Amino acid sequence: MRRKLPLYNSIQTATTPPGKGMALPQVMGTVYIETYGCQMNVSDSELMAGILSGIGYYLLDRAEDADVILINTCAIRENAEEKVFHRLQHLNSIKRRKPDTVLGVCGCMAQHLRQQIIEAAPFVDIILGPDAYRSLPQAIHAARSKDPFVGLKLDRSEDYADLAPIRKDGVRAWLTIQRGCDKMCTFCVVPFTRGRERSISVPILAEECHRLVDEGFKEIVLLGQTVNSYQAGKHDFGDLLVTLNQVEGLKRIRFTSPHPNDASEPMIEAMANCDKVCQQIHLPLQSGSTRVLQAMRRTYTANEYRDLVAQMRDRMPNLSISTDIIVGFCGETEEDFQQTYSMMAEIRYDSAFMFKYSDREGTLAHKSLTDDVPEKVKIERLQCIIEQQYQISHQINQ
Ligand code: 5AD
């Protein structure tokens, strides 16, 4: 059985204090959490909210009002980090007005840019990486005594499976089933900020799912860095889908983001056969050029990806597919780019997240490849695929 921290039922604010007679921990203070980046970060913020609520912190929705401000950050592209540096300067103005305010930077950027944060934002009191959220109470305690706290140890056994997140009320709940990433795509900083892959067991996830249904959620979105590489003991991702599909009262199951290489037969069969699993997949392509895919270490060719999409559409004719694309990766020629452009036209994604390559310190590409596509060309290529995708999405939506 999972051990649960004492929790409030939903996010409480200072204007909605708990009712009389409820067994709640002593009020220790108030906290505001701001989230950047992916759904995994949203889920991690819910985890942090759960940890802090369990020791008597109220969640507020305005930074200005809180004793503790936590920024949960993203490191995937340079502009994600720039945004946070900007925001930190603004939050420092709150600290200047209220010097006892504790300011923490958590998540991937904390893990990735510790030194830069210390130098550019010396007023930050707490720096916590994705595997260090258990030390939040300790970190806040130290910071409140004016003792800065840094927690950046990656821990391949940390899955937070015994902790209960606090989710905003609604229809959809995020459920982290796996943490970390073992894929080592050359462009990607995630394996270095989130560490090695680990999965939470099927019984724990099934129990959590029942609890979510009891709380009123209708849909769950399973989260993992490469969610379909899920492996807990002898259970793979297909097994998990089949098990969760049996949870009574649950209406829909989605997941994000799968890796094409882990899109196994059992996963496809589970998607096709389980009535609660939505026939929708976000399947990152990254590039339509096999040469570039190899440089990215994506471990599939353009044709293998095509075959996979054909196989899935064959089993699920109405499958909705979206993707991620990076343009301007190291060494991408005009011809490589044209292959991406035409592959997107051929597959006709329902939607796509499109990015220009951003060189990230610590990645394999940063160490061994040259970021040689001029910024102007990256922007032109990005605009080109955005325009095409806009047309395709528009036609499909019609
Ligand atoms: N530059 C640009 N885009 C990136 N992504 C990951 N790393 C980078 C990078 N260095 C994109 C990929 C991934 C999505 C989450 O972000 O397309 O699938």
Image (cartoon, rainbow, N blue to C red):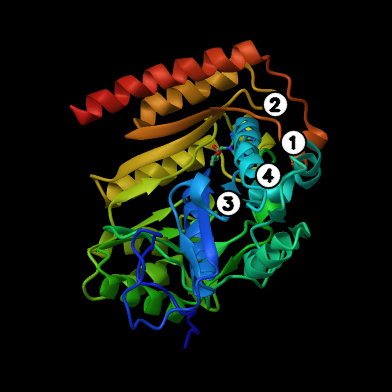
Residue 163 screen position, x and y as percent: 52, 74
| Residue in the picture at 68% in, 61% down | 196
Residue depicted at 77% across the width and 36% down the height: 120
Cα gap from disc 2 to disc 3, whole angstroms: 38 Å
Q: Earlier in the sequence, mark 3 or mark 4?
A: 3
Question: Regarding mark 4 in the picture, which secondary structure is present there?
Answer: loop
Specify whether tag 3 is near ligand 1 (CB below 8 Å).
no
Image x and y of residue 189, in percent: 68, 44
Mark 1 crowdedness (10 Å alpha carbons): few <14, some 14-19, many ≥20: many
- Front-lying residue, 378 or 317: 378
For residue 388, which quarter of the picture?
top left
Amino acid type for the residue under numbered disc 3: Ile
The mark nearer the N terminus, 3 or 1, is: 3
Residue at which label 2 appears:
330
Residue furthest out toward the left: 398
Q: What separation in Å lies between label 1 and label 2 (alpha carbons)?
A: 8 Å
Q: Between tags 1 and 4, which lies in front?
A: 4
Give the mark nearest the N terminus, 1 or 4: 4
Mark 1 CB near ligand 1 (8 Å cut): yes
**To which residue does mark 3 refer?**
69
Residue topped by disc 1: 365
Mark 4: amino acid: Val
Residue 41 seen anywhere in this rendered image of the structure: no
Residue 9 higher or lower than 91, as above or below: below
Report crowding for label 3: few under 14, some 14 to 19, many 20 or more residues within 10 A (C-alpha).
Answer: many
- Is the C-beta of the residue carrying label 4 under 8 Å from the nearest atom of ligand 1? yes
- The reply to whether callout 1 and callout 2 are in contact (CB within 8 Å) is yes
Name the kind of residue labelled 2 in the image.
Cys
